[in-house]
Amino acid sequence: MNSEQNKQLQEWKLKYIKLNPILLIFMGLILIAFGIVSQTVDINYEYISTRYDEICANKIQCSITIVVPSKMKSPIFFSYEVSSFFQNTDKYFNSIPYDLLYGNLDFDISICDQYKSNREMGKIFSVTNKTLEQDEIAIPCGIAAYSYMNDEFTLTKDGNQILITDKGIAWESDKEKFTNINLDKQWIDMESERFINWMRPSPLSKFRKLWGRIDQDLESGTYTVNIQIKTNDAFAETKKYFLLHNNGQFSDPILVITLPCLCVGPFLIIFGLINMIYWGKKQNLIKKYRIY
Amino acid sequence: MDSHSYNNETTIKKLGFITVRPPAHQMNDRSIVSNVPDLAVPDNQITTSKYSSIITFIPLNLIEQFSKLANVYFLIIAIMQMISTISITNGQPVIMGPLSIVVCISMIKDFVEDYQRRRSDEAENTRKTYLIRTNEPPREAQWRELRIGDLIKVQKDEQIPADILLMQTSDKKGNAFIETKNLDGETNLKCKNIQKNLKQLQEQSEDSLLALRMTIKYERPNPYLYQFTGSAEINNQQIPLSEKNFILRGCALRNVNFIYGVVCYNGHDSKIMLNSVKAIPKRSHLERTMNLFIIVIFLLQMIMCCFGGFLNSQWQQIHNSELSYLDIQNTEPEHNFVKNLFIKWGNWILIFTNFVPISLLVSLEMVKYFQGMLITFDKGTYSAEYDIKTTVQSSNLNEELGQVDYIFSDKTGTLTKNQMDFKCLTVNKKSYGKEVTLSNEEVSKLAQVTNVDFRDKAFFNDLNQTPGKGPLHEFLLCLSLCHTIVTENKNGQLLYQASSPDELALVNFARFCGYTFEGVDASNSMVVNIKGDNKIYQLLHVLEFNSTRKRVSVIVQDQQNQIILYTKGADSVIEPLMKPVVPQLKEKTWNDLQEFASIGLRTLLLTRRILPLQTYKEWEKTYLQACSAIQNRDNLMMEAQAKIEQELELIGGTAIEDKLQEDVGPTIQNLKDAGIKVWVLTGDKIETAINIGYSCQLLNDTLQQIIVDANDEQSVNKELEKAFQKSQNNNKNALVISGNALIIAMKPEYSRKVMEIAERCEAVVACRVSPKQKQEIVQLVRSNKPNVTTLAIGDGANDVNMITAAHIGIGIKGVEGQQAARASDYAVGEFRILRRLTLYHGRESYRKNSTLVNYNFYKNMLLVLPQYWWALNNGFSAVMFYDQLLYQSYNLFFTSLPIVLYAIFDEEFSGDILSSNPNLYDIGIKHKLFNVKIFLYWVINGTIQAGILSYLTFQTYETSSIYNGMMAGLWTTGAIVLGYSVLNSNIKIILFSNTYSIGVIFALLGSVLLYLFLFFIVSEKMPKSDMSNSQSATLIHLRFYFATLLVVGATSIFDFALTKFAQWSQYDQVTTQHDKHIELQDEQFLHQPSPNTQFQLNNSQVPKSPIKRGYTGFAFSQEEH
């Protein structure tokens, strides 16, 4: 290698770039800033969670009053949350017959495990209220469909029902894919966005699904939530909540992001500064030994 | 004649379709008839390539690929992936993707290497030669066509296509000069000749040569380059044939217009092919440890997977009642604890597939290759003096260079230049050469010669007093006659070609004094020009040097028909053969020799004997008989030679300086400071060795010298005991041990003691050792201390054993030939390059390759373990939340390139700093960067980081909606976890890098961008994918970017803090040590007597080493053939 090439090789190395302390301090500052900002931006954020499975135990219908402390601006989201429910086990999400859900009857029936026929699923009437053949394949079938969380909620204030729409609550890409086959043979409308949301497996055992949205502001005051319990035995051991929340910019339970940010940030800055001081002290050494 | 009648081949074994020839030493001795090609023996084609064609390449190479443990592991994984009960990939063997890419890269590399070999084979096989065969017109034939028994004609400057027996040359005397550079690297010409009794062939025409039927009997093929015994039968007369009549394949013909020869050995039976050793692949310490760690990781994987399976079974037992919706029936495996455990175990193994890093071996190989290239390109490893670049022949030892504990060095040609300068002489109670009295002007009037450093006017004054007679005349005459030098006339200038630099110095000195050896004329007479007067000496016999005889003799007949034997050799060898000498003369001569030896000069004794005609005639008869013996010829000849070398008269003694190479002293000093133990193994006698030791700073006065030298077992035992006591009392020792003592000390009962003594010695010098002993010493150290790394450096054929025996072999390409360089792992031009090679390249390679290996484990922890941590949420039910395409690309595309570039280009300190600061080398010797502790640190670090990463991501993405109340879902969050793994493992490189090359930065950015791009493809362009729209749903939100910062900040915080602090505290140490080092050096310069690199004959400067009488002797630099 001649000297020219050698020089090129040397130039190829960006020497004397001290990325670490700068990077550290920069990251720390951003995290702290973000921690603070996340608190202030979501100042109007409201989040009301109420557990109802105990109150409504052994009932088909029950109602719960909730208090909205301050005015909530639209859009407001109505979600339900379940805990100790395992959508994340392999057995569970391997039992989602995507082909069937996407409108294709020609699929591998073994996916549905022990929930293949209408009888096994315990379904008698179709969406259009026709009687279903008990021995026919249930549309849809499988564990996930069987354990569909189909409790229904209505929200009233002073006797006036507030509209909770189920439009625009599922992922666009999912909506495009889910296709009905024959409503007379289906026990549920597979294009229903609530159903689509349920079929999207959640990774945690305590998870939340969007049930509907309210496109009007909610004044502060007392509201009544009427719940129609329709779920089957799958939810026997499960805690159920419904929640009313609006759109948080960063997160709903604020502590999840803010707290770690505020904890990690200062550490990064401290380490960065120490590195910086150390580096400054070592300037002579750096010159002498070409330590980068 | 029936071609099978010779029985030159023993039975050919047949193994299926492949025929296997017996190894050379199992074949029969050969017998051929000239000009009758023996078709039973294969032709002259050679194949050095491993694979004969592309069809056999694929299966054979595949077998080789899958003999690697890692590949077998992944193959088993692929099979497991196809078993439906445990498969997590719907029975698709997805691991085959990355596995086939990795295997393909290796195969392509093998193919390219093999293709190059095949090309060079083809070029060699299709070279042209002139073949003359019965019943065929003479023609240009390809080399590969030649059969044994064929007659060929080779023109000047052509290469010899096979091992041939000389039949005719264009030279009238029947001589042929050949250059053997290809064989042994020596550039001097060697003379071969037609057997005297075959001289009648010289006059015959090509046709009559062709018609000649001569039966030639000779040995079976063997690898000994300098041995050929056979006999020819012509007209019922037995004619002995020797190595002198025999020319080897690969030599080039010089100075002669053409030769004819009969092919004796061809193809793979030729000596050059039998000498091409297949290098045994050496593996570095790091690699061996790495393989151990791979097994450990594999076991860890098995245990973790089993644990996962166990936890899942446990969980199932507890939660089955809650999980009624899963409707697990009693017949299903989930209910059977043990069955479930095994199934889940299998599932987990498949999820953990990448726990053993698939790309590790390939990237390590690639990195080492490029590191090797950088070593070659480095200016510091280039020897400008000899114009030799360092070549890397097995780059897989790069990091081993950074961990050397012991260096075994040859002396001649390695520490010294192998350039001999004539310095001193002692004749007739007077010694000359100590004073510098000749002026430059006077020197310019004398003959201009090389290899002489002699400026003593007294010698010329004494010489001119008695011109043509007297002891000085005899002395110079002996010098100009007793040698085996070949002359060459180039542009009217007389050039000497010597096989030993000692001889060159001696003959040149004679020429310097006006006794010019002009060459051997047509009538085999030596012509010596004594001050313009040509004297002719009929050369009768040359009794050549070998390492048993340690002497050379010539028998000449002068113009007065007086027959004189001149012998020169080591004093210890010559002394018993001498006539009694006047005691004063003997004492003076021996004292002088002792004095010469004590300043590191090589001494030599010159003697002669005037032979009565009768004695000579009688002796010649027995000698010629011995020469024509077919069996045991060498021994018979030596016996005969010893008979005539008796009753020798003393002429005088000479002393030759062996020049040290540049910078040998500082290099050895630095290597010693680095904590490396330097052993010098030399054929020299003790004094010379000690003095060379002083001049190259291996020994100094601060070291207590322990000398072990004895010839019988009892005294060796006693001396060892004494040495052991001495070494226990002192911390700074140097051991000097002689070859004879070593033979005994090598016995198992003593070897432990020797090692214990050597352990406490900074330097060890072993004198008078044979090549085999050199190897034994290396093996002794290796077997007694299995964990150390040994490095052997040498330049000659005698070092090959040692070089191959050590962990790392370094060959010096130099005067003594290429054999050592060819057998070595690294070939360098000079000894001083060793410093840069070990202290800089070795250390840096060790540091970088350790990091590379650790990092590869770490990054796969980061990939695999988030799933394990996450499994806390779902009762370890063995779910993989990554998209398969992205997951398999992780090792191939997202994290492979930056670490490779890092390992090639990163530099902690510049080369100059490292090679002058030996204390920075200790990381390798002490295994500081690659040991169980460090490995555990990385593994635990990776485990914790995977946990943090997994926890934070799932918390930020799954406990709240990502936008408009919507939830992310398993696959989307999985993709984000993978993204953070990619980001984190790339950022880790920034953390431990010392220099940030543009390449690394671009590769880092590229890797992350590539991930984003593939993520984009999968999520946006593949609507069928589980995670479609994931990217557009997550990346447009600020949350993603802040979560990124949070995750990176939280995972890297300890790395940031710890790695840099560790590094800087190390630098702290460096400064202090460095400053101390400089002070120490200065002190040494002040206090230490200057090493004897300059020739000064001041006795007070000679180190006072306890040199005993009786050691003086001579070591020829010439090696045993």
Image (tube, grey):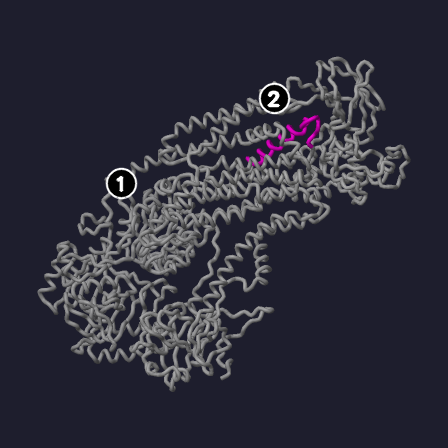
Q: Is residue B231 left or right of residue B536?
A: right
Q: Quadrant of the C terminus of chain B?
A: bottom left
x 46%, y 70%: residue: B269
Give the quarter of the image for residue B319. Answer: top right
Q: Is residue A202 left or right of residue B710?
A: right
Q: Nearer the viewer, residue B745 or B698?
A: B698
Provide residue B72's location: percent of width, then percent of height.
60, 52
Looking at the image, is B949 positioned above or below residue B418? above
Q: Amino acid at mark 1?
A: Gln
Q: CA distance from mark 1 to mark 2?
A: 67 Å
| 10 Å crowding of disc 2: few (<14), some (14-19), many (20+) | many
Q: Is residue B876 left or right of residue B983?
A: right
Q: Secondary structure at mark 1?
A: helix
Looking at the image, is B1079 positioned above or below residue B206? above
Residue range of the region highlighted in magenta in the rendering? B941-968
Provide residue B176's location: percent of width, then percent of height.
33, 73
x 52%, y 30%: residue: B1054
Give the quarter of the image for residue B513. Answer: bottom left
- The residue where tag 1 is placed is B1084
Q: How many marks?
A: 2
Q: Give the prevailing secondary structure in the magenta stretch.
A: helix
Q: Residue B648 shows which numbered tag?
A: none
Provide residue B1064's location: percent of width, then percent of height.
43, 32
- The residue where tag 2 is placed is A38
Provide residue B485's location: percent of width, then percent of height.
26, 67
**Residue B878 sits inside the magenta stretch:** no
